[in-house]
Image (cartoon, rainbow, N blue to C red):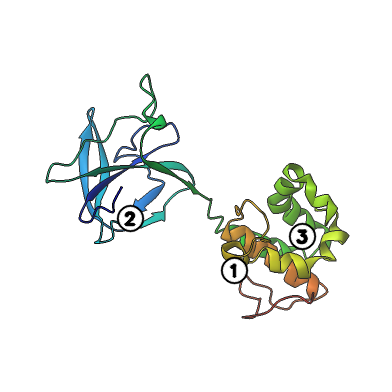
Amino acid sequence: GLPSPNTKVLVAQYDQNLGLVPTQATPLVVFGTGEQSVVTVGGVPTIVTTVTSDRTGVAEVAIASFSPGFTVLAFYPYTGDTAPSPLPSLFGPTMPITWAFYTTVRCLPFDDALPQRFVDQWNALPDQTLAWQFIYNEILYLYDMVFNVMLEFVNLGDQKAVEGAIGTIWKLTSAEAAKESTMAMPITRDMSAGKRRTLQLWMYLVANGYDVKDFSVDSIPEGWGPPS
């Protein structure tokens, strides 16, 4: 019941099926802190990292997203010099997932190429309807279908309705709002940076009457926002 300083914690990465992620597989996250090593469990080598708690008993591990998907990080605290061996799976007859120390991590797709695709389409054929169809099909369709409560505020399937609400949408879908605001949209916080940028580019076109010279992914001036 007391903080445990200088306690080591081995952190292992499991895939969505709750099996250890082998070294030859593409990881969903990569470790940024701790002493990394390769351990072999059941003949499968996997990368783990070991971090140590501070004087207050807090141990921190830094991770960075590497590929989209769902992963589980399991924590194995220990004292002494002998690290525990990670379980080969957190699922099975013994169901260790029911008692293991773990956290889930969801890595979003980056969608880095989406803004350029939108810009290229607009520059090749600057058509308002086609631009809207791109935005709806690639970004808004999911939220329109899954979260129909949005109809109380704006019909995400109606171009004119969305165009008329860009001031509010801009604020509620900003990266800053996603981090801090309880009003952020989408409420699931699952809009990737690429999709957010593409939506912003479209809103920039709308706010400028679809008349933007030399349209590019960098067209939006720093600090710009549409009128409320």
Q: Are marks 2 and 1 in contact (CB under 8 Å)?
A: no
Count of marks overlaid on the render: 3
Q: Earlier in the sequence, mark 2 or mark 1?
A: 2
Specify few, some or many for label 1: CA neighbours under 10 Å numbering under 14, 14-19, or 20 or more: few
Estimate the x, y position of residue 151 in percent, counting from the top left: 83, 50
Estimate the x, y position of residue 81 in percent, counting from the top left: 11, 46
Estimate the x, y position of residue 31 in percent, counting from the top left: 32, 53
Q: Is residue 196 left or right of residue 16?
A: right
Secondary structure category for the residue under label 2 = loop
Between 40 and 90, the residue placed more toward the observer is 90
Residue type marked 3? Ala
Residue drawn at x 26%, y 49% is 49
Location of mark 3 (residue):
131
Q: Nearer the viewer, mark 3 or mark 2?
A: 2
Specify few, some or many for label 3: CA neighbours under 10 Å numbering under 14, 14-19, or 20 or more: some
Residue drawn at x 45%, y 49% is 67
Residue type marked 1? Glu
How far apart in space, not on screen, are marks 3 and 2 (Cα)?
A: 42 Å
Residue drawn at x 71%, y 68% is 170
Secondary structure category for the residue under label 1 = helix
Location of mark 1 (residue):
176
Q: Is residue 135 left or right of residue 111?
A: right
User: Can you tell which quarter of the image residue 221 is in?
Assistant: bottom right
Secondary structure category for the residue under label 3 = helix
Q: Earlier in the sequence, mark 1 or mark 3?
A: 3
Specify few, some or many for label 2: CA neighbours under 10 Å numbering under 14, 14-19, or 20 or more: some
Residue drawn at x 75%, y 53% is 136
Location of mark 2 (residue):
61
